[in-house]
Amino acid sequence: MRTGEILLEEIPGPFDLQSTVESGQTYLWRREDGMMFEDSELYGGDAWYYTVLPASYTGEDAEVIKVRQLDEVLEWRSTFDADNALRELLRLEDDLERIERELPGHDVVEQAFDRFRGMRLVKDPVFPCLISFICSAQMRVERIQKMQEEIAESFGSSAEFDGETYYSFPDPLELSEASEDDLRDCGLGYRAPYVESTAKKIASGDHHPLDASSLDYKEARDHMKQFTGVGDKVADCVLLFSLGFLEAVPLDTWIRTSIEEHFPECDAGSYEKTSELIRQELGGDLAGYAQTYVFLHLRTS
DNA sequence: AGCCAGGCAAGTG
DNA sequence: CACTTGCATGGC
């Protein structure tokens, strides 16, 4: 077992672990005591969170990372040296002070920043991110997380840590062995065939979601939409929460409602046009940051 | 009991 | 294109 600390005064701007991993932008982290936002709101505590990286992330084994935030440090324990991985997964290099400064001043955005100061975007491993957002259609956050747990336990590989067994999210090849019925048993409902098709497409080597990284934003979105179960909204989520396209603004039900209330002039009907208008309104290259703050603010108020 | 949840695919006009 | 419909599941 390895352990370590990341000094928070050494990263640019504030950081808040709870709002980052419980914000609904990732379904791949768990609080060790099983509680989440809905139970505790912002409790300001020092709970341990964990995630299990798939083997494809390091190229070797599945790795368990546990992390908690104390006053001025991020303390971690892991099956491997998790320092670099944590900095990447939690986007600790983002200059959050500059980002907040550069975003245009709108009441709802500023309220969200005040309430969840230190929330950062995440950078999830791309395959679990893609599958989890395919599962997210017409589903509540808590249930999406549960579906990912079921998938991991059924098809992922196990890792021992602290005397307990953890399951990583399966790699494409592992998940490609799942039948539609297997996936329905994980509670996916009508999303099961979408996940089956996408896993098999990636496992066959035809298309990989990572290939979108080298494209510009709009091409990247089209690339993602080749996968069954991926439309405009899910494509934007994967680009934003895994591939670092910070200009992506997923238009979900919460954001659409918010646009009607606060930015009616941006409501252009189609996803494409509305997305482009709200992106400009929310700060262009960093609009995804503003989107995620507003989403969290609205979803929990 | 009925409604709804971070939508999407497939089918029309 | 823009618009409609069906879709599994579980919590409230």
Image (tube, coloured by chain):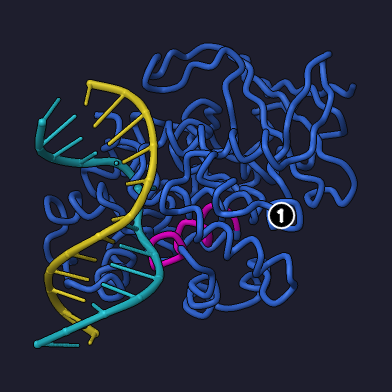
Chain colours: A blue, B cyan, C yellow
The crowd level at tag 1 (other Cα within 10 Å; few <14, some 14-19, many 20+) is: some
Q: Nearer the viewer, residue A166 or A88?
A: A166
Q: Main secondary structure of the magenta part?
A: helix
Q: Which residue is mark 1?
A: A177
> Which quadrant, please, contains the C terminus of chain A?
top left
Check if residue A159 falls in the magenta segment: no
Snapshot quadrant of residue A11: top right
Q: From the image, which quarter does the N terminus of chain A lie in?
A: top right
Q: Is A134 rendered above or below residue A224?
A: above
Identify the chain of the residue marked 1, using the numbered disc in the image. A
Whole-percent x, y for residue A195 in the image = 55, 57
Residue B4's quadrant in the figure?
top left
The residue that appears at 49% across and 49% down in the rendered structure is A98
Q: Name which residue lies at 25% across and 69% down.
A: A274
Question: What amino acid is found at the position of numbered circle 1 in the picture?
Answer: Glu
Position of B1 relative to A178 (above/below) = above
* Residue A206 location (% of width, % of height): 70, 77
The span shown in magenta is A230-242
- Give above or below for A211 relative to A234: below
> Considering the numbered disc 1 on the image, is that residue within a helix, a strand or a loop?
loop
